[in-house]
Structures are given as structure tokens and as C-alpha cells.
Image (tube, rainbow, N blue to C red):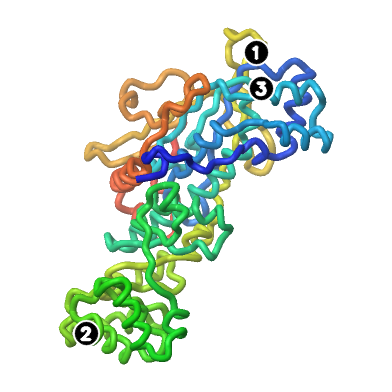
Amino acid sequence: MSTADLGLPVDVPSTALFTDRYELTMLRAALRSGAAERRSVFEAFTRRLPEGRRYGVVAGTGRVLDAVANFRFDAPVLEFLEREDVVDAATLDWLADYRFTGDIWGYPEGEVYFPGSPILRVEGSFAEAVLLETVILSILNHDSAIAAAASRMAVAAGGRPLMEMGARRTHELAAVAASRAAYVGGFRSSSNLAAGFRYGIPTIGTSAHAFTLLHDTERDAFTAQVDALGRGTTLLVDTYDLTAAVRTAVEIAGPELGAVRIDSGDLLLLAHRVRQQLDDLGAKDTKIVVTSDLDEYAIASLAAAPVDSYGVGTSLVTGSGHPTCSMVYKLVARATSDDRDAPLLPVAKKSMGGKTSVGGRKWAARRLDEDGVAAAEVVGTGPVPADLADHQLLVPLVRHGEVIGREPLEAARSRHIAARAGLPLSATQLSRGEPVLATETA
């Protein structure tokens, strides 16, 4: 249960300055030219997946909705913009009353995506929609990268629990967002209390090597922890001699010992040795937790080991080598005049170097084969073909400025599990390859 579920305030500050200066200078110029109020359609998408990834994972949608709702220019912000000569007096007056009044559609959080997928579509006046570019991209690029890494790790874990513990390896605020994205991608818990407080993610944690080193002996440390936390606690057993520590742990906690954690060494070999030792000591129900700079490949290598759960930090919160998804936010259509009923004109960037875009307000649907397995991602403009009408991917998130797409985080997590299960089997392979679904243009 999250703070919102409890009726408590969620600490989301104003997001008005989570943007780049050129958003505001464009606004200033557009207001002067008279084009600022032209109805416009922006889309967030990626031209390619990170190298070797077979699918992407949409994450951060809920945070985007919070960011849009909290995009406000208060007096101190306006004073800063005036002092920095970012905008003129007319633009300051416009910003003082800023509220997004348009519509946002997007892939629901937890859904998978592919190159060219219109992950988020923002419709409104140019002025109000262009200001949201940077904050939307910063959230989606970060959270989707973490969720994609988490999803690959969940596949490698084969159903064994994964614990996120990367807060000390990234920015303190990014750590909270990373915990949330990891949960969407398949992790079950987090060491981060702020993530637990804000998003209702289950939290875990017992002790570090410092706790053992604090005491005169390892036995003293284990005794103190068991006395405080109970026999079901997890004892860290690789501070000194692993074999002696496991024996001491069972002597103190008995067969009711919850788990032992191994944080160094050859985890495959040590897990087998510890499992045998625990069984010989009568602690057959005691679990084995492993940590130590794991990534999806290390987790996969432990598939045959008697490991019960994994704790992952650095690799997870850095996107396992791909800390961004390279999403962009492009104007794809705009009205031919300021008239609210003016038709939309498709617009597109036509540049060198593979940075082109496709014009037009788009829909997206997933074509399934006869077995109900995803066969292609279909993106088009205009009418949706009848055979794809029931498989459309974009859902309404904001209507006339009002957020309508909020949902429990658990819904996004469950959606991702279902979406991943609906992909071809090759999607679950960790080997490098092309996107598992081709994107077709309709």
C-alpha cells in the first residue's frame, strides 16, 4: 500500500524547471509569432532499442502523470526566469497561469515496446505541450531502462525472488525511481525505505559486514541479530570463514534460521557447499541469498545452483550497461491555423544520419498469431484496420488536463509479466539479437 492509498501526501515538488532553457525560448518566440496556440501532437518514441535488447519495457508512466500535474510556475521560479532573462514579460504572464489542458495517450505502464512504438502521445497547444518534453523524456528514459534490465534479470532468475539494493550506487532521488521501475520489471522488494514509503514496495534488509565487525566475535554479532530480529532473520556469513560462520549461525538460530547471505567469492561453488552444510546441520529450510555485483548473466549462471533469491544493486540501477533508452519527443502533427477546428497537418524531421521521424498522429496495435503469441507491432495513421481494433495499445492517460490514467503500481507489474509472457519464446533469451517483434507501418 502506497502513501497515496493511505491518504498521505506524496512528496512531488513542482516540476516546472525540470526542463531545458530552449523549451522556454521556443515558447517566447512562438507567443510572439502567434503560433503558440496552434493545436499540436507530440510523440515519444525510440528509433532503436539498446544494442542486443530484444524488447523494451514502458516504465515511469505514473511518475510522468505526477510530473504533468505538478508542472507549475510559482513566484520564485518566475523571478528566476526573469532574472536569467530567459523569457520576457508577456511570457512570464503566460507561465504564471500555466496548466496543461490537453490530452495524453500512451502505452500502459509495464507494456513492452519496440522501435517506432508511439509510447506516449501528447496533444494540446504547441505552447503547453512543448514545455513537457524534457521532464517526460528524463522520466521515461531512466525508468524504462531500469525496468528493461529488471525484466531481463527476472527472466534469468526463473521465478526466484529478486531484491533491489542499488540506492548507494546512484543519485538519491534516482534510487527511488529505480526501485519503482525495478518493481515494474519483476523485482519483488527493495532495500530503499523511501521507495517503500512512496510507492508501497515491500522493503527488505538485515545487516552488513560492519555489524559483524562491530562485535568482538561473529558469534556475538549473530546472537545480537537473532535476539533483535528473531530466528527467521538472514545472517551474513562471509565476513570471516564461511564454513565456521554457517555452523555458528545454525548453532545460534537453530533450524528455524531464515536465511544466510553470501556476498563474495565463487557464488556457484559456495552455494552448493553451503546448501550441503545447512542440510547436514538440520537446517533444511534455511534459504540461501546471494549478492555481489550480480547482473542478468551472473544470475543466469546460477540457475543450477541451490540459490533461493538474489540481491542486485549496481547493474540494475545503471540499466545493466544501457542507462537510457534513447527516447525522443517529436512534433508529428500541427494544425494548419490557430482555429480549434483546423485540420492537422503531418510534420516530420527529414535529416541525415538516421534521425528522421514519421509524421502523423499515430495509433499502435499488436498483431497476434493463431496461437495468441505476439507476431508484430503495427503502427499507423488514419483508421485502425478492423482486425487490429481489439489489440490497440495506447490508452487515455490525461483528458482535457485531468489525469485519468493513474493505477496501482501492482497493476503495472502484473501487466508486464503478462506482456512478456505473450512474446515469442526467443524474447526470453539473454543472447544478443534484433527486436523480437518487427515494427510494421500501416
Q: Which residue is mark 1?
A: 336
Depicted 221 relative to depicted 91: above or below = below
Task: Give the CA distance from mark 1 to mark 3.
Answer: 26 Å
Dot 2 crowding, Cα within 10 Å, few <14, some 14–19, many 20+: some
Q: Is residue 304 visible?
A: no
Do the residues bearing badges 1 and 3 touch, measured as CB atoms within 8 Å?
Answer: no
- Amino acid found under the numbered disc labelled 3: Asp
Q: Residue at x 26, y 89 (%)?
A: 247
Question: Which of the two residues, 35 or 53, is positioned nearer the viewer here?
Answer: 35
**At which x and y percent is residue 258?**
25, 72
Task: Give the CA distance from mark 3 to mark 2.
Answer: 68 Å
Q: Residue at x 77, y 26 (%)?
A: 28
- Amino acid found under the numbered disc labelled 1: Thr
Question: Which of the two residues, 265 or 173, is positioned nearer the viewer here?
Answer: 173
**At which x and y percent is residue 288?**
28, 74
Q: Quadrant of the C terminus?
A: top left
Q: Which residue is mark 3?
A: 97
- The numbered mark, 1 or 3, whose residue comes first in the sequence reads 3
Q: Residue at x 23, y 37 (%)?
A: 370
**At which x and y percent is residue 307?**
28, 73
Q: Residue at x 30, y 52 (%)?
A: 425
Question: Which of the two residues, 298 or 412, is positioned nearer the viewer here?
Answer: 412
The label number, if any, that marks residue 158 in the structure image: none
The label number, if any, that marks residue 276 in the structure image: 2
**At which x and y percent is residue 273?**
27, 85
- The numbered mark, 3 or 2, whose residue comes first in the sequence reads 3
Depicted 442 relative to depicted 270: above or below = above
Depicted 230 relative to depicted 27: above or below = below
